[in-house]
Image (cartoon, helix red, strand yellow):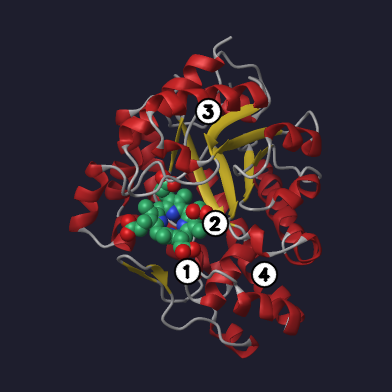
């Protein structure tokens, strides 16, 4: 197996193998937001530190990244960080407010505000702390699980930069797409360029798989997606793979997760992402038809299924694994863990995946 120098040999490469479409002994499993507030040990660390201080301190980021792996036999660790470090690196202020989530005190109000942004090529120099956290975590993992790096997709990041926080309608950000198409493309290009540098930096630092979160796909439709999202998702995948190759590093499987984007699947299957993540609103059998036989699928249990009892979780996982099949499949939830979920119910989810997916 190709191995970057200086990192421990892989003891468990199940997720990496599945992401490349290779045979596995059982379906690999991890979950989005596996490091987070549903874990008491996370809340304990979080009580002592500001959210972005945790992201910016490699030892803390590494500590909370590993917390879920100390509890559950997961096949991947996702680095503790946030998609909003890119707008921060482009010069925007982002605060994490308790009970409210991320807030930009001065969001982009119009095209003139683009001049406020730092050059995208320089943005990554401010994100060295993420690279350091990845390198440290890759060492600490000792090859027991695959390390996933990530970023937001350009449309999703643009939406936060304009809305300034989460939004039900995304009407300000979508207003730009209809009113300021040219400036929207300029903004998307800046984010894309910064993201490409950022993801390549993550690979250099030790990330073994990259996931691109298009968390706000649901707000676009087929046409807006083709105009304002797909070309940038394509550039990210093509350019990251190209630059990683030029650096002489092994090819890195890439995952794209279009939350709420059932209508995007056929288009996304034409890109080079090896893995497509789906949420629970898409039937796995339909997803397979749409993406064809060669892509790997990831997902997709409704996170709220974890509010059910352990028996119902077991039944739901059995159905999920039967529908996806055991190959070219990575088990996950259809979105992240919520803070009020019971860790024991996540344990039941992971256990059931392993029970129903062994060859
Ligand atoms: O285990 C992990 O997944 C932890 C690492 C991680 C990741 C991958 C965090 C920590 N955030 C993310 C990605 C992220 N951040 C996404 C993409 C995934 C998704 O769709 O959920 C998005 C949209 C964000 C933005 C964000 N950060 C939100 C959503 C805001 C909204 O209303 O639209 C929130 C609430 C955060 C805060 C956050 N990020 C991560 C954690 C653990 C938290 C909770 C905040 C806290 O502890 O105070």
Q: Is residue 153 left or right of residue 132?
A: right
Numbered disc 3: secondary structure: helix
| Image depth: mark 1 or mark 3 in front | 3
| Image coordinates for residue 250, horizontal then vertical, percent | 62, 34
Q: Who is closer to the viewer here, 121 or 21?
A: 21
Residue behind mark 2: 198
Nearest to N terminus: mark 3 or mark 4: 4
Foreground: disc 4 or disc 1: 4
Image quadrant assignment for residue 277: top right
Nearer to us of marks 2 and 3 is 3
Q: Where is residue 194 drawn, in percent x and y? A: 59, 64
Residue found at the very far bottom of the displayed protein? 112
- Which residue position is annotated with label 3? 316
- The verdict on label 3 being within 8 Å of ligand 1 is no
Q: Which image quadrant: the C terminus? A: top right
Instruction: Point out the image quarter for the N terminus.
Output: top right
Residue linked to disc 1 = 89
Q: Based on the displayed image, in which of its 4 quarters is residue 140 positioned?
A: top left
Q: CA distance from mark 4 to mark 1?
A: 15 Å
Q: Secondary structure at mark 1?
A: helix
Q: Are marks 3 and 4 in contact (CB under 8 Å)?
A: no
> Can residue 85 be seen at all in this image of the molecule?
no
For the residues labelled 2 and 3, the Cα–Cα distance comes to 37 Å
Circles 1 and 2: CB distance less than 8 Å?
Answer: yes
Whether residue 199 appears in this view of the structure is yes
Going from the N terminus, do you reach mark 2 or mark 4 first?
A: 4
Q: Is residue 27 above or below residue 288?
A: above
Which of the 4 quarters of the picture holds residue 40? top left
User: Which residue lies under the disc numbered 4?
Assistant: 188
């Amino acid at each position: 197996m190709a191995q970057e120098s200086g990192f421990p040999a892989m003891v468990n490469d199940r997720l990496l193998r599945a992401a490349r479409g290779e045979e596995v002994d059982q379906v690999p499993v991890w979950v989005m937001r596996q490091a987070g507030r549903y874990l008491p040990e996370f809340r304990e660390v979080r009580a002592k530190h500001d959210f972005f201080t945790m992201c910016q301190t490699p030892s803390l980021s590494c500590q909370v990244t590993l917390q879920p792996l100390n509890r559950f036999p997961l096949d991947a660790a996702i680095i503790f960080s946030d998609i909003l470090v890119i707008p921060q690196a482009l010069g925007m202020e982002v605060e994490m407010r308790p009970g409210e989530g991320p807030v930009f005190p001065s969001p982009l109000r119009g095209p003139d505000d683009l001049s406020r942004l730092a050059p995208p090529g320089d943005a990554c120099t401010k994100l060295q702390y993420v690279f350091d956290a990845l390198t440290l975590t890759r060492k600490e993992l000792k090859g027991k699980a695959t390390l996933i790096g990530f970023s937001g997709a350009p449309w999703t990041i643009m939406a936060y930069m304009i809305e300034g926080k989460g939004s039900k309608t995304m009407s300000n950000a979508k207003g730009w797409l209809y009113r300021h198409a040219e400036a929207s493309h300029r903004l998307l290009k800046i984010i894309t360029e910064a993201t490409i540098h950022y993801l390549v930096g993550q690979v250099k630092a030790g990330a073994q798989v990259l996931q691109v979160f298009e968390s706000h796909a649901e707000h676009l439709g087929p046409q807006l997606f083709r105009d304002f999202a797909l070309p940038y998702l394509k550039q990210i995948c093509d350019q990251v793979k190209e630059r990683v190759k030029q650096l002489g590093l092994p090819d890195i499987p890439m995952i794209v997760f279009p939350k709420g984007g059932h209508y995007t699947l056929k288009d996304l299957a034409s890109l080079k992402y090896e893995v497509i993540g789906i949420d629970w609103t898409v039937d796995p059998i339909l997803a397979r038809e749409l993406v064809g036989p060669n892509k790997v699928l990831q997902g997709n249990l409704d996170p709220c299924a974890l509010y059910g009892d352990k028996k119902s979780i077991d039944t739901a996982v059995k159905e999920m694994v039967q529908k996806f099949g055991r190959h070219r499949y990575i088990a996950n939830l259809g979105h992240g863990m919520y803070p009020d979920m019971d860790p024991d119910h996540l344990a039941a989810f992971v256990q059931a995946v392993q029970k129903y997916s062994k060859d």
